[in-house]
């Protein structure tokens, strides 16, 4: 058997199989190595491995058809969020790893008093990826949450859930007492104390989360984390402040986002 004298003598399919053990980011960078690697790093067989195993179940749920001419192009398109399930969820792939990201809109959450316009209304917001966001008028019992199937997330991956929101300039009732967030999957339950509007108040308590600004103009606060194993289970999440009946107002909720915890 003749020995391989250079990288360009290797079969393209062999290079593709080797690149499949790397990450999408590494596979993309490998195209600069040689013409062989450029061809191998664009093959459908390679990028099929980077796509979710249930991609054929996800694509029909897209609000708008996803057009693509190759698996690599499909991967690239999915790195920008697409709306699914009637526009009530968004799905995306993490560009560097190919792991799934999911956001559940406020319309897909259960919200105590959410059907009463005296307490909550749904309105459009040009900064939101969804058609509507939930706007809190006033409540003393703040309680909302939802549920997703674990198969919408990447298996054997540690995830964090984030509450995506804005506070209006005249908002109130969120500095004290602190709010509570929880995530559960199977027997695992993660509970976190959060402060949506810390103001001058700062905490060194590692179990208490404070918001941070996002690049899209919204704020987010971590609700908890969990390991998504290789089993199909329900992931339940909840955000609330019901221990004290102080009035709260001026909160705008876009949704809950699930991202791999790096």
Image (cartoon, rainbow, N blue to C red):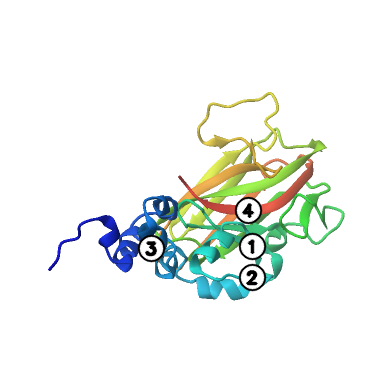
Closer to the N terminus: mark 3 or mark 2? 3
Q: Nearer the viewer, residue 67 or 112?
A: 67
Q: Are marks 1 and 2 in contact (CB under 8 Å)?
A: yes
Q: Judge from the rendering whether residue 42 lies leftward or rightward of residue 149; answer left or right.
A: left
Q: Residues within 10 Å of mark 2 (few under 14, many from 20)?
A: some
Q: CA distance from mark 1 to mark 4?
A: 15 Å
Residue at the image point whose x is 38% and y is 58% from the top? 35
> Which label belongs to residue 256?
4
Q: Label 1, secondary structure: give it.
A: strand
Q: Residues within 10 Å of mark 1 (few under 14, many from 20)?
A: many
Q: CA distance from mark 1 to mark 2?
A: 7 Å
Instruction: Identify the residue under disc 3.
Output: 40
Q: CA distance from mark 3 to mark 4?
A: 38 Å
Q: Nearer the viewer, mark 1 or mark 4?
A: 1
> Which label belongs to residue 62?
2
- Which residue in the rendered view is the most extreme toward the top? 200
> Which label belongs to residue 247?
none
Residue at the image point whose x is 77% and y is 60% from the top? 131
Q: Judge from the rendering whether residue 226 lies leftward or rightward of residue 125; answer left or right.
A: left
The image quadrant that residue 87 belongs to is bottom right
Closer to the N terminus: mark 1 or mark 2? 2
Quadrant showing the N terminus? bottom left
Instruction: Identify the residue under disc 1.
Output: 82
The x, y position of residue 192, in whole percent, is 54, 42
Q: CA distance from mark 3 to mark 2?
A: 29 Å
Q: Label 3, secondary structure: give it.
A: helix
For residue 42, say whether it is visible. yes
The image quadrant that residue 113 belongs to is bottom right
Closer to the N terminus: mark 1 or mark 4? 1
Q: Judge from the rendering whether residue 123 lies leftward or rightward of residue 78; answer left or right.
A: right
Q: CA distance from mark 4 to mark 2?
A: 19 Å
């Amino acid at each position: 058997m003749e020995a391989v004298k250079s990288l360009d003598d290797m079969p393209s399919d062999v290079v593709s199989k080797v690149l499949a053990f790397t990450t999408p980011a590494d596979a993309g960078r490998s195209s600069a190595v040689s013409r062989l690697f450029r061809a191998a790093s664009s093959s459908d067989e390679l990028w099929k491995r980077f796509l979710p195993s249930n991609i054929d179940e996800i694509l029909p749920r897209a609000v708008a058809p996803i057009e693509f001419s190759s698996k690599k192009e499909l991967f690239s398109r999915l790195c920008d969020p697409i709306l699914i399930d009637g526009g009530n969820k968004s799905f995306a792939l993490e560009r560097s790893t190919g792991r799934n990201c999911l956001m559940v809109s406020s319309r897909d959450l259960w919200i105590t008093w959410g059907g009463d316009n005296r307490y909550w209304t749904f309105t459009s917001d040009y900064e939101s990826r969804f058609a509507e966001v939930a706007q809190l008028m006033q409540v003393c019992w703040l309680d909302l949450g939802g549920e997703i199937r674990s198969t919408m997330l990447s298996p054997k991956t540690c995830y964090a859930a984030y509450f995506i929101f804005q506070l209006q300039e005249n908002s109130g009732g969120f500095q004290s007492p602190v709010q509570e967030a929880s995530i559960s999957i199977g027997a695992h339950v993660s509970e976190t104390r959060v402060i949506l509007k810390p103001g001058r108040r700062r905490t060194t308590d590692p179990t208490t989360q404070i918001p941070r600004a996002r690049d899209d103009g919204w704020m987010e606060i971590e609700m908890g984390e969990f390991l998504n194993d290789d089993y199909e289970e329900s992931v339940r999440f909840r955000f609330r402040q019901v221990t004290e009946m102080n009035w709260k107002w001026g909160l705008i909720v876009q949704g809950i986002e699930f991202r791999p915890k790096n």
